[in-house]
Image (cartoon, rainbow, N blue to C red):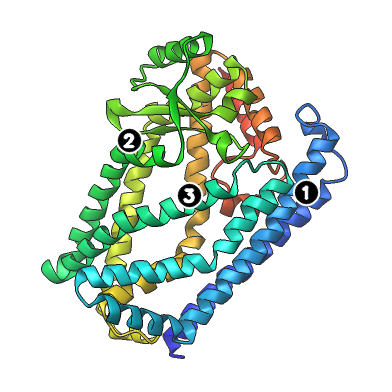
Amino acid sequence: MTPFAIIVLGLILLRYFFELWLDSLNSDYVRRHADEVPEAFREIMDEATYRKSVRYTLAKARFGTLSDTYSTVLLCALLFTGWLATIFEQVAAWTGESAWGFAIALWIVILLMSTLSLPFSWWSQFRLEARFGFNNSTQHTWWADQAKGVALSFALGVPLLSLLLWLVNASGSHWWLWAWGTVVVFQLLMSVLAPIFILPLFNKFSPLPDGALRDRLDDLAKRTGFVNAGIQLMDGSKRSKHSNAFFTGLGKGRKIALFDTLVEQLDEAELEAVLAHEIGHYKLRHVPKRIAWSFVTTLIGFWVLSILAGQSWFAKSFGFEPVIAGVFLLFGLLAGAVTFWLSPLSNFCSRKFEYEADAFASEAIGSGGPLITALRKLNRENLSNLTPHPWYSGFHYGHPALLEREAALQYNHLSG
């Protein structure tokens, strides 16, 4: 192996063993609190549910370790034996060396790698999630989702990759700026088009029925000055008993989507609080801030990619010919070994936004009580880890732990 390849292998293994250490640290921390429900949670969970949440957390940790070990071994085997380069070259020889041909070759190689990890996705859904009562998906629905995902990745990914590869040759040394601009436009278009054309391929969206709940949520939107195109109910229970709420679309075309499981689990006051939290993200401009940050990181990524593309040793270190398509593939596979270490910064910003949205919701409805009870129910129903280790949550949690959010809401109430 070349010196650079040895460095990359070291980075991959460093991330892997650090993840193992984090998982072990978190699992030990959870076990230390497993014997009885901690006093702070006795109003939230009975002992049987709490023990089940502990088992669920530990089971996910064990499965995550197995999955991460497999993916790391697979990545190293493909990269450092030259197999990946050989596979890519053979596929590219078949698809052709035009921008379109290379784009299809990239898509095929990525699809092959994803297929090798498909059994873990299946096991997670039909064994792990089913074991703890969360899976509602049928084999037909799950496999149909996989097929739709593959078709969409080809229909959207191949033309985009083809355009990016064409720009490399057509726009000179500043191709990375044009490529970045193309990706920005693509992401903005998807924000508008995905709710209309893509999400309905997987889930059914229907207007929230007329009644007290809809009137209450519409009144909240009017009070907070939130303009939207409607509140929709999504059949999330078709696949899972987990619950969520989110926005779709941009501008006046934005819609509020509530999982049907969420509506079943919470009462009207709690649903109003959850919606107020989501509106808080919008009113406090968290969404454009996140989008802007993603654009900045994407720009940096393309800049780094342009530098590596100009260094023949980068591709040759892994057996690739120095063609831009191979550099694209390598960069996509290796970037995570570096960006992983930036996770705490990203999660810190995300948690800050969550605190701010909680405070907005508390003020919008005049009390933090309904949001606290909603969070308690959601943590109970989803068997959330109530006692994450701080180091683990720093790297993996974009939301504060339940007690942290409760404390912040109570402090805001007292200080207000």
* Rendered view: 116 above or below 208: below
In the image: residue 53, left or right of residue 365: right
Viewer can see residue 361: yes
Q: Residue furthest bottom?
A: 1
What residue do we see at 52% from left, 32% from top? 235
Q: According to the image, label 3 marks what residue?
A: 145
Give the Cα separation between the discs numbered 2 and 1.
39 Å
Number of residues whose C-alpha sits closer than 10 Å to that of mark 2, classed few (under 14), some (14–19) or many (20 or more): few
**Residue reaching furthest front?**
140
Report, in whole angstroms, how far the alpha carbon at label 1 lies from the one at label 3. 28 Å
Q: Earlier in the sequence, mark 2 or mark 3?
A: 3
Q: Nearer the viewer, residue 30 or 197?
A: 197
Instruction: Label 1: state its secondary structure.
Output: helix
Which residue is identified by label 1? 55
Query: Which residue is denoted by mark 2 in the rendering?
Result: 196
Q: Nearer the viewer, residue 262 or 334?
A: 262
What kind of residue is marked 1?
Arg
Q: Are marks 1 and 3 in contact (CB under 8 Å)?
A: no
